[in-house]
Amino acid sequence: MRGSITILMFFTLGLMVGRFTSFEQLLYGIDYSSWALYLLMFLVGISIGADSRALEMLRTMNLKILLIPISTILGTTLGVLLVSVAIKQFSLKELMAVGAGFGYYSLSSIIIKNMHSDALGVVALLTNVIREITTLLLAPHIAVYFGKISPICAGGATSMDTTLPIISVSSGKEYAIPSLVHGIILTIAVPFVVTLILSL
Amino acid sequence: MLAVAIIMGAGMLLGFLLKAKKKTVVVNERLIGYAIYLLLFLLGVSIGSNQEIMNALSTLGLVALVVAVAAVLGSIVVGWITYSLFFKK
């Protein structure tokens, strides 16, 4: 949770600077955002490639584990589809792109800001931060009432790092590996799925 | 989409090759952290100087809350079904 609070603090600091200073004019006309995004994606790629757990995952892969990320993708899509009817400000496609952040708030919000708009980028940031915090707070209860897979699905991409400890406590140690595999798959999927949806 | 695949793929390959160099990996993680802080700060600046979005901020927050709750609930329900069908002993 400390990570998501820090992120929100940097974002809020930016809001203040943008609101009360003319810092924005210094940046005006400089297209820092596309190359910065590509650089970030490259660094994230390195981090995934260098993560020995990613390869370990392929070795211990049990096909049944794949049902978990499929459930998360299906569940997120269905949930967003249902509420999109009530949200007038954004189209289904836009909300789907936000949902496809699967809790990976940093990368998804930056991609969405660059490919789409600032407004949708903010929605993506907040939605996915809320997703992570909700999972951190509610995982123990979710596991009791909705089975041991549900906390993993709720956590989305965060089930490989920030929400992994609470998931392994709530669902049991035997779900730590499935949680990790689930998080890695979604983390790799996020940049592709978000970009794909926005380019439709 | 293709650009994303190429860039991420190249990064993953490089990461795989650099895996043994623990220091590089640690530096990389730190760079990612700084890059994210910087980019989200800049997102904030861009939003803060846009009066239109600032006025709509509470609406955007509400939309985010609704979408987050829907995504989490949907995931929980489908996860519950998957658990009952395939994992419960």
Image (cartoon, coloured by chain):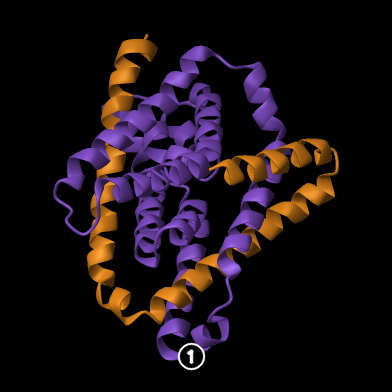
Chain colours: A purple, B orange
- The answer to whether B58 appears left or right of A170 in the picture is left
> Looking at this rendering, what residue extends furthest in the top direction?
B89
Q: Nearer the viewer, residue B3 or A157?
A: B3
- Could you tell me which residue is drawn at 38 percent across and 31 percent down? A72
Chain ID for label 1? A
- The answer to whether A50 appears left or right of B57 in the picture is right
Exactly how many numbered labels are in the figure?
1
Q: Where residue A81 sits in the image (x, y, percent)?
A: 23, 39
> Looking at this rendering, what residue extends furthest in the right direction?
B21
- Could you tell me which residue is drawn at 44 percent across and 61 percent down? A113
Instruction: Judge whether residue A165 can be spotted in this image.
Output: no
Q: Note whether B69 is above or below A167 in the view shown.
A: below
Q: Where residue A88 sits in the image (x, y, percent)?
A: 16, 56
| SS for callout 1 | loop
> Looking at this rendering, what residue extends furthest in the bottom direction?
A21
Instruction: Judge whether residue A79 can be spotted in this image.
Output: yes
Q: Nearer the viewer, residue B50 or B37?
A: B50
Q: Nearer the viewer, residue B25 or A77?
A: A77
Q: Nearer the viewer, residue B51 or B30?
A: B51
> Which residue is identified by label 1?
A22
Q: Amino acid at mark 1?
A: Ser
Query: Which of the 4 image quadrants contains residue A112?
Result: bottom left
